[in-house]
Image (spheres, grey):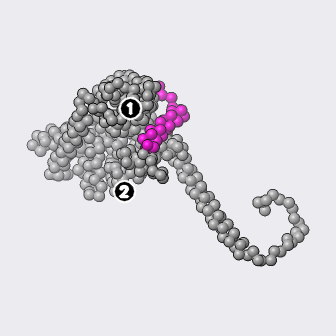
Amino acid sequence: MTSAHPRLVPWKTSDELITLRSQFFPESETTHKDQILYAKRAISKTLSYQLKANIPHSMLSTAHLKALQLRFNSLEIEIDDSLQLMSTMTIIRFVNGLLDPSQQSSFAIPLNVLAKKIGLPSWFVEVRHAGTHESLPSLEMLELCINHALNWLFENYWMKIDDNKDEDLIDVDTELDLKQREDFKALLKNYRRIRKLNINKFIKPGDSTEIGKEYWIIMKQIQAQLNVEILVDQIIPGGKLKFDQIRLMYEPLIHYLMVDETNEQTIEILEFLIFKIYQYIKFNDTNSIIKNDIELSQGKKWCNFIIIERLKLHTELKIYRIIDILGKFNIDETHDLLTKLSEVEGINEIHLEKINKKLKLMNKLQVNSQQNKEESKRLNFDIDDISNDLENLKKKMKLMKQEQNVKVKLFEQYENWEPKPFGVL
C-alpha cells in the first residue's frame, strides 16, 4: 500500500530491515564468534544508511549501544574514563532522542511522565539525570543500562517492523509468547496443588507413587520452560502470605533449580530479584513486581536464601558471578549481602578479595553520592537565605519611605577610626 506521505529512506525494501534486525539480535543458537561478526556488519550497515539519508533515532541508537556492548564483552577491554564517558553520553542521547519529540507543551513536561507514556522504564531517566548533573554512573551500571536499552529497542522498535513476507509474524510471536506464559502459570498451579496435599513433606526423586511421578514430571517441565519474571512474581505475593509460608511452598522448587551445577537459572532469578529491588529503592518504581515494603522484605529474604543459606550448592564460578551481580547495584541491601558473604565460613581467598574490592568501590561511590546530596542541601539553604534577605530588604524599603520626615543627624566623630574596605568590620 502506497503511503500518503512518502519519505526518502536509505533502504530499498523492508527485507533489508528484517536482515538488519537479525544481525543486531541473532538467534540464541548462533555462536559467539558469529554474533560478533553479525553485530559488526549491522553497525557498519546502519552507519552507511546514515550517510544516505536521515534514519530513525532508535536504529542509530541500536548501532551505538551495540558497539558499546561489544566493547564491554571483549576480553581485551581496557577500563578507563573514555569508556565511561562514551557509555554515559550514549545513554543520555538514547533517552533524549526518545523523549524530546514528545516535549511539545508550552511548559516543560517532566521526563518521567514522557517516559511512562512510551513505556520506557523511569530508571533510564534517573541514570540520564545522574550522568548529566552528578557523578558518572559506574561501568557496571552503564553496562546494565546498555543491555536493557537494547532489549527495550528490540521489543518496542525492531519487533514492530513490518515483514512483507509474513505480515502476521509479530501477532503470531505475541500469541506464542502468551501461550507459553499461560502454560508456565499452569505448571506452577499444578506444583502448588501437589505441595498443598502435604506441604511439610519432601518428595524424593524416584518416588514411585502417582503423586510422586506427577510431581517430578512437573518439576522437570518447570525447569525446561522457566519464565523468571512469572516465577519471581509468584514467590513475592506481597501481603497475601507470610514469608515462612511462601518459603515452605517454593523452597523445594528453588532448591531443585540450584542443585544442577550446569544450570544458570538460579543466577538469572537472583539477578532479576536484585534488579527489581534496586528499581524500587532507587527510583521508587511501584509499577514493577516489587510495589511496597512488604514485597521488598520478601525479595530480600529470597536473596539471602539463595546466596547465604544455600551457598554450598553454588560452584566457585557461580559464586564469582553472584559477587559481580551484587557489585552492579550500589544499595544498602547488596552491600549487606556482600558483607555477609565475606563472613561465611569456607569462602575462598579469591572470592574474598573480589568481595573486598566491590565493597571498597561501593563505599567510595556512596561517599560521593552523599557529598552530592549535602551540596544540594547547602545550595537549597543558600537560596532560601537569599529569598529571606530579599524579603527583609523590601520591608526595610517600605520603612524608609514611611520615615522620610525623620530628622537626619550628622555623623559623630570617631577618634580611633581606621579606613577599611566596604563589608569588612
Position of residue 417 in the picture relative to residue 26 (left or right): right
From the viewer's side, name the closer residue of 425 and 240. Answer: 425
| Neighbourhood count class around disc 1 (C-alpha, 10 Å): few under 14, some 14–19, many 20 upward | few
From the viewer's side, name the closer residue of 182 and 158. Answer: 158
What amino acid is found at the position of numbered circle 1 in the picture? Arg
Q: Looking at this view, name the residue that lies furthest to the right.
A: 415
Q: Position of residue 248 (x, y in %)?
A: 24, 51
Q: Is residue 339 visible?
A: no
Residue at 50%, 45% in the rendered image:
130
| Span colored in magenta | 74-101
Residue at 85%, 72% in the rendered image:
410
The quarter of the image holding the N terminus is top left
From the viewer's side, name the closer residue of 28 and 132. Answer: 132
Residue at mark 2: 293
Q: Position of residue 224 (x, y in %)?
A: 22, 36
Residue at mark 1: 7
What amino acid is found at the position of numbered circle 2 in the picture? Asp
